[in-house]
Image (spheres, rainbow, N blue to C red):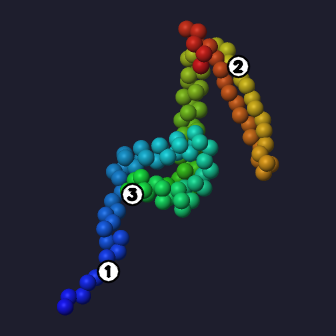
Amino acid sequence: MKKLRNTKITDFAKPHHPHLKHIQKQRKESMLKWMLITDQPISTVTNSVYKEKISNFDLFFIIPEEQKVKIMISKSYNYNRENLKNLLNEMATSVSLTTDLWSSRAKHEYLGIAATWITTDFKIS
């Protein structure tokens, strides 16, 4: 009589082949955009539930480490800062700034700044 072998769920898993570089980069940028827009902490990338959820959506996406996310944020800041400076130089004569200061219950202090200007064709930006 032939002995049956117990099958494990991992026996059905595909071998792990990461995305091509340009697709991985696109996924990382999308993840960073989500983190920044929804005010997620950098530690999100180490959260086991987050990792599980991402692997359910995209098995081949390699989630960047916290240090890489910090570097991505820094690069994004520098890139967008330059774009904003160029936009203001080209489009705005006068800029109105609005500030908002607050602190969290954990005594973390925050500063929000919003800039508004009217373009040469009288559109509010």
Instruction: State the residue at coordinates (62%, 44%).
Output: 39
Decide which of 109, 49 is in the foreground and name it: 49
| Relative image position of residue 32 (x, y in whole percent) | 52, 45
Closer to the camera: disc 3 or disc 2?
A: 3
| Amino acid found under the numbered disc labelled 2 | Ser
Q: Is residue 119 left or right of residue 112?
A: left
Task: Quadrant for the N terminus, please.
Answer: bottom left
Give the residue type that dot 3 points to: Leu
Q: Earlier in the sequence, mark 2 or mark 1?
A: 1
Q: Secondary structure at mark 2?
A: strand
The single residue placed furthest to the left in the displayed view is: 1
Question: Is 29 located above or below residue 1 in the figure?
Answer: above
Residue ranking furthest to the front? 1
3D distance between C-alphas at marks 3 and 1? 25 Å
Mark 3 neighbour class, 10 Å CA radius: few under 14, some 14 to 19, many 20 or more? some
The residue where tag 2 is placed is 96
Q: Amino acid at mark 1?
A: Asn
- Residue 5 placement, left or right of 113: left
Residue at image coords 62%, 50%: 41
> On the rendered image, what quadrant is the C terminus found in?
top right
Q: Is residue 81 visible?
A: yes
Give the residue at the far top of this rendering. 121
Q: Are marks 2 and 1 in contact (CB under 8 Å)?
A: no
Q: Secondary structure at mark 1?
A: loop
Asked whether 89 or 66 is in front, the reply is: 66
Relative to 19, 3 lies left or right:
left
Residue indicated by mark 3: 59
* Location of residue 17 with respect to 24 vertically, above or below: below
**Mark 3 / mark 1, whichever is N-terminal:** 1
